[in-house]
């Protein structure tokens, strides 16, 4: 029996900040941001809207789509590096907001690979029959740790949330294989400093990401006993269009078989993969029985990939 996705939801804040808006407040240009990253605009949460609020809205949609009641959730896993506060966790706040009375709750911190870590953790509990319904949320309010005086990073990030309800699915569907990894020696390239701001050596992270995304994607395909030709759709972490393109080319996939939502949302870290999947489901690009490869990487350094046969 495989664990799979019973329902998925997302929420992005209303406020849109375009590259042109950023041009007015810092030394940057729409042309630089678009050509170097693929980003055109991003969503920024309101002051009174914190990480748990974003998570709640995505979770409600996922539960509705899964047709699962909050009381029937056994566990809540929230992947985030921007919790409302260090503790209580966002997952506990979410448990209260949802009224998910019987759920055990904890947060996972693996930066932009966090959603992969969360889904793969949930898979273990489901496939050992310990739990039936697990809510996994990837959520960030990166705007609160963005250094708005640093053009190297400020133009990249956005706020948002994506959530899945996971549970047992029918034969042949669900998670077929996964890979997780980390390399703490690269932690110095992407971290939160003493002022609570994001600091990044973009070129180093870029090199790591290009290598790791392609490698992890190829590995999960092989682990599932499949070949590149079997892949219907690639959902890479949306950090930079040039990194995503390198992964796509490594899999010899045509452009239309890769999710590209970075232009609308920027880099939403742990939220980027589920936000992208909802976007592509709405666009009709992901269908039941499609073989989807998701792959993420982030600060830590961390990475994770999943091959999943979509549908219940
Ligand atoms: O989610 C996980 C994490 N993050 C990533 O995946 C990020 C990975 N890295 C990247 O995406 C890219 O390295 C960046 C988009 C961050 C930077 O692109 P790049 O092509 O590596 O640019 P660079 O850092 O080599 O900088 C090139 C130039 C520099 O000017 P000089 O020194 O050549 O005169 C920068 O100062 O671009 C300048 N620059 C900017 N110019 C206008 C850097 N940021 C900006 C900006 N607007 N926002």
Image: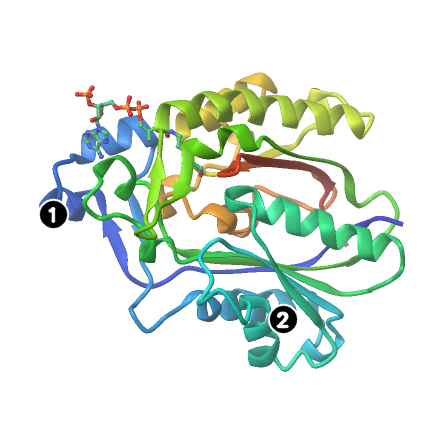
| Rendered residue at 27%/32% (across/down) | 34
Q: Residue at x 42, y 31 (%)?
A: 189
- Residue 90 vs 272, above or below: the answer is below
Vertical side of 56 occupied by 3: above or below = above
For residue 59, side relative to residue 187 (left or right): right
**Can residue 294 be seen at all in this image of the molecule?**
no
Quick check: marks 2 and 1 in contact, CB under 8 Å?
Answer: no
Measure the C-alpha gap from mark 2 to mark 1. Answer: 40 Å
In which image quadrant can residue 191 be found?
top left
Q: Which mark is residue 189?
A: none
Residue 283 location (% of width, % of height)? 51, 47
Q: Residues within 10 Å of mark 2 (few under 14, many from 20)?
A: some
What residue is disc 1 on?
25
Quadrant where the C terminus lies?
A: bottom right
| Element type at mark 2 | helix
Q: Is mark 2 within 8 Å of ligand 1?
A: no
Residue 203 picture location, percent across and down: 37, 23
- Look at the image and tell me whether residue 52 can be seen: yes
* Residue 64 - label: 2
Q: Name the spot of residue 162 as percent of width and height, x first.
A: 53, 57
For image coordinates 39% across by 58% down, the residue present is 141
Quadrant housing residue 201: top left
């Amino acid at each position: 029996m495989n664990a799979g996705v019973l329902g998925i939801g997302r929420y992005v804040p209303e406020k849109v900040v375009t590259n042109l808006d950023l041009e007015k407040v810092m030394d940057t240009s729409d042309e630089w941001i678009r050509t170097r990253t693929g980003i055109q605009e991003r969503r920024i949460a309101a002051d009174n809207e914190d990480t748990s609020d974003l998570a709640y809205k995505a979770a409600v949609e996922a539960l509705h789509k899964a047709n699962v009641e909050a009381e029937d959730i056994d566990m809540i896993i929230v992947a985030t590096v921007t919790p409302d506060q260090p503790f209580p966790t966002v997952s506990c706040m979410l448990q209260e907001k949802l009224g998910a009375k019987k759920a055990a709750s904890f947060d996972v911190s693996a930066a932009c690979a966090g959603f992969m870590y969360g889904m793969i953790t949930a898979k273990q509990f489901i496939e050992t029959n310990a739990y039936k319904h697990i809510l996994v949320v990837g959520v960030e309010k990166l705007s609160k740790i963005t250094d708005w005086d640093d053009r190297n990073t400020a133009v990249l990030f956005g706020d948002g949330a994506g959530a899945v309800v996971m549970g047992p699915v029918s034969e042949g569907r669900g998670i077929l294989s996964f890979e997780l990894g980390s390399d703490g020696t690269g932690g110095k390239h992407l971290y939160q400093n003493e002022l609570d701001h994001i600091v990044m050596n973009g070129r180093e992270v870029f090199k790591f990401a290009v290598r790791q995304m392609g490698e992890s994607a190829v590995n999960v395909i092989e682990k599932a006993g499949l070949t590149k030709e079997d892949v219907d759709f690639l959902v890479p972490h949306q950090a930079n269009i040039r990194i995503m393109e390198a992964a796509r080319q490594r899999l010899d996939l045509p452009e239309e078989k890769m999710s590209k939502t970075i232009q609308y949302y920027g880099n939403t870290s742990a939220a980027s993969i589920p936000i992208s999947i909802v976007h592509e489901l709405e666009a009709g690009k992901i269908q039941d029985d499609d073989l989807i490869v998701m792959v993420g990487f982030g600060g830590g350094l961390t990475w994770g990939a999943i091959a999943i046969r979509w549908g219940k």
